[in-house]
Image: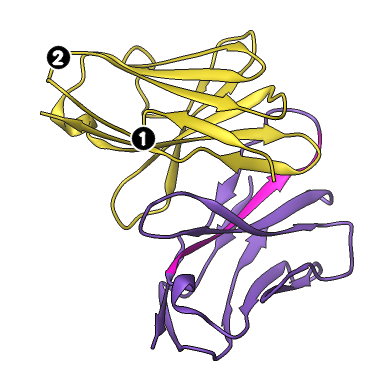
Amino acid sequence: GAVVSQHPSWVICKSGTSVKIECRSLDFQATTMFWYRQFPKQSLMLMATSNEGSKATYEQGVEKDKFLINHASLTLSTLTVTSAHPEDSSFYICSARRQDTGAFFGQGTRLTVV
Amino acid sequence: AQTVTQSQPEMSVQEAETVTLSCTYDTSESNYYLFWYKQPPSRQMILVIRQEAYKQQNATENRFSVNFQKAAKSFSLKISDSQLGDTAMYFCAFIYSGAGSYQLTFGKGTKLSVIP
């Protein structure tokens, strides 16, 4: 199957700082990538859809100024959590859409804000 | 809008036995993909099996097979010869297969426990 790499897999940061998470499709071009947040024992909650070369589309209730998404190339999308606070602590996971076969997921990033 | 429903929040199965996880969906589209993803405690989302809606033949991957009933909008996952490593959350998912940035729609998941 297709490979999607997400980095870092685990990060701790101080409250008020920013954290950048990268999502790379290693062996295919992904015009569309998705960013999810997952709370414990729950399903994935879509935060935003990232299209290469254009602005991301955010889901209702997701602060676009807090969760900055950049999709600068066909293989890389980044999510930056700005001015992070403890309530932003969560598991963030990206997926990249491969047109002919569906969506593949990164390993996820566990963010802890202290 | 598409919806995916998994009616079994939790299930358990004895090791080496067979278990079936249910999934129903609702869509007005005719061309789409359906997936089963496995999320073990590591939280990595692992693709278990994929089904194209235009294919009548049910997909199989080793011990995993699906029963795809397009008219009934049902997509169940059968796990044969269950192993301890199958213990995980299982998510059923849907995505439109046309061009465009259509999102993956997930069910709420079924927590499967394989009992030794």
Looking at the image, which is closer to me, B30 or A92? A92
Q: Which mark is residue A9?
A: 1
Pick the front one: A114 or A26 = A26
Q: Which residues are magenta?
A: B88-98
How many dots with numbers?
2
Decide if residue A108 is in sight here.
yes
Tell me the chief SS of the magenta region: strand
Residue at numbered disc 2: A16
Q: Please, is residue B21 above or below residue A106 in the view?
A: below
Quadrant where the image shows the C terminus of chain A? top left
- Residue A82 highlighted magenta (yes or no): no
The answer to whether marks 2 and 1 sit on the same chain is yes
Q: Colour of chain A?
A: yellow
**Cβ–Cβ below 8 Å for labels 2 and 1?**
no
The answer to whether one can see residue B28 in this image is: no
Residue at mark 2 to residue at mark 1: CA–CA distance: 20 Å
**Element carrying mark 2:** loop
Mark 2 vs 1, N-terminal side: 1
Q: Return the x and y of residue A52 as percentages of the image width and height.
A: 64, 14
Three-letter residue code for mark 1: Ser
The letter of the purple chain is B
Name the residue: 67% across, 17% down: A74
Residue B12 position in % (x across, y down): 42, 84
Residue sitting at x 77%, y 34%: A99
Is A6 located above or below residue B46 in the figure? above
* Mark 2: amino acid: Gly
Which residue corresponds to the image point at 58% horizontal and 74% vertical from the top-left? B22
